[in-house]
Image: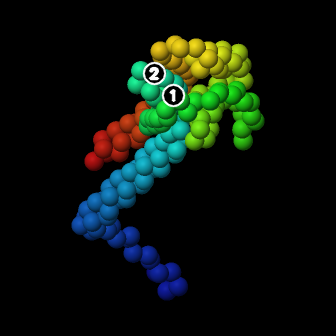
Amino acid sequence: MATDPKVVPFPAPASPPASSARVREPHLRALKIALSAAFSVALLSTLYLLLADVPVQFRLDCDRGAGGCWAERETMFSRRVAYFPVQSLRDVRVRTFQGLRGAPRVVLIAVTDSGRMLVAEYSAAEKQAAEADAAQVRLFLSSNQPELRIAKESGHSRWLAIAVFAPALLLLAALWWVLLREM
């Protein structure tokens, strides 16, 4: 059988040496870990930024014996307390405003000698509760009651955090489980 001089047989593809596959594999592992870590940090940072300033509880405690009032605002990740003397408390006001997004908000603001201070924040549906708390503060100011305690807890905020964080943590756990299982 004569061979055609125009037809050139192709050589069989050479398989890469086993050492090059071993060289590439650690780099891929390192890349997977780096990308997973970056994704985890990005997701958790975004959740933190979304939920960091969500109020959980507001409190106003005034004590004539101690001579001071403490306005406390607790968020998901922090707690801020402001102090002012009882004598500087002049009045409280209930204000309704339209925020940048969502439904209108109702706030209870303490008017003191040194300025105004946010005492509590309510939803638009809770305006009557805000008015009742304001009446309680005005009664404290006009009488000789020894103490005033107002606490407003936002119960849905904790559930919001659980509803948002739980699926995100499950996603991250599944991602890391799959990643580490392959190694």
Identify the residue under disc 2. 63
Residue at image point 35% right, 53% down: 33
**SS under mark 2:** strand
The part of the image, by quadrant, that contains residue 170 is top left
Task: Estimate the spatial distance between the alpha carbons at disc 2 and disc 1, rounded to whole Å.
Answer: 7 Å
Q: Which of marks 2 and 1 is nearer the N terminus?
A: 2
Q: Do the residues labelled 2 and 1 touch (CB within 8 Å)?
A: yes
Query: How many callouts does the rendering have?
Result: 2
Question: Which residue sits at x=44%, y=76%?
Answer: 10
Residue 137 falls in image quadrant: top right
Tell me the element at label 1: helix
Answer whether residue 3 is visible to the viewer in this image.
yes
Q: Which kind of residue does numbered mark 2 sit on?
A: Asp
Near mark 2 (Cα within 10 A), the count class, few <14, some 14-19 or many ≥20, is some
Place of residue 160 in the rendered image (x, y in percent of width and height, measured from the top left): 54, 27
Residue type at mark 1: give it. Answer: Val
Position of 5 relative to 166 (above/below): below
Task: Name the quadrant of the N terminus.
Answer: bottom left
* Image height of 119 relative to 127, above or below: below
Residue 36 lies, with reference to residue 137, above or below; the image says below
Task: Give coordinates of residue 128: x percent, y percent.
Answer: 70, 15
For residue 86, the mark is: 1
Front in this rendered view, residue 110 or 42: 110
